[in-house]
Image (tube, rainbow, N blue to C red):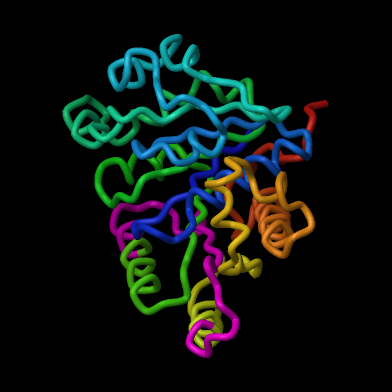
Amino acid sequence: MTTLAIYSNKGGVGKTAAAVNISYLAAQTGAKTLLCDLDPQGSATYYFRVKPKLRSGIKGFIKGGKQVYKSVKGTDYENLDLLPADFSLRYLDVTFSILKRSKKRLNKILNPFRAEYDLIILDCPVTISILADNILNAADDTLVPLIPTTLSVRTYRQLLAFCQKNKYAVSRIYSFFSMVDRHKKMHKELMAAVAEEFSGILQSPIPYLAAIEKMGIYRAPVTVFSPRSAASKSYQDLWHNIQGAINRGHHGYGNREKIHGQRG
């Protein structure tokens, strides 16, 4: 069983689109998948046509156990469930900060789901505070969308510095290029420079395409409404590389159960 956080300390990088498409593709392989929408904006919840509401709101979420378990909703897709967002999650940082073991509360909340699912995916809000600590403690692996721009690379360096300072293994962090325009010389040059500077860069870029923006119209993963598109192929390649990296225990850390579909 693996917990994968789709996280960025910079907004507008294609994080939720990646979470929605990856969770769908994982479920299609037979892996029982839970997508947790931790972003109070609830975009992932919207894409899956689910009402953005948790039982008892943030209080029920923090309490964990049955309250959270009963909030899980099925989606239109086999093997894929959703823990929906709730607008009250905007107070999650503040709430965690006043609790004991404040940096590991999310990990405790997710524990009841780990025996039931092959893969838990966290769609995370933009944060670099105590919620980021919770995310990094709860996740086995963290996937960071990275736009090939100077500011995006700068925030990625900030994230890696934050992880090193707080003793979170940088080896658990992967990144992929998002919203790529291969016609732009700057994008190509920055992608080459970043791949040379950092380890853990997955060579499966997601292009900037209208099909991805249409997810909001169809309220579905790209591979559902446009299965033969370049966008669909890009997300399939990304999921294949994520799956391979996790199953290989890339960078030589911890042994985890492989993501290989139905449990034997």
> Most extreme residue toward the right, as rendered?
264
Front one among 109 and 208: 208
Q: Residue at x 33, y 46 (%)?
A: 132
Front one among 175 and 246: 175
Residue 208 in percent (x, y) is at 56, 68
Residue 204, above or below 106: below
Does residue 48 show up? yes
Q: Residue at x 28, y 17 (%)?
A: 59
Name the image quarter holding the C terminus.
top right
Instruction: Please say whether residue 179 is one of the residues in the magenta stretch.
Output: yes
Task: Tell me which segment is drawn in magenta.
Answer: 161-187
Residue 263, above or below 200: above
Residue 9 in percent (x, y) is at 34, 57
Q: Residue at x 51, y 82 (%)?
A: 187
Name the image quarter holding the N terminus.
top right
> Most extreme residue toward the top, as rendered?
66
Does residue 244 show up? no
Front one among 90 and 139: 90
Instruction: Please say whether residue 236 is one of the residues in the magenta stretch.
Output: no
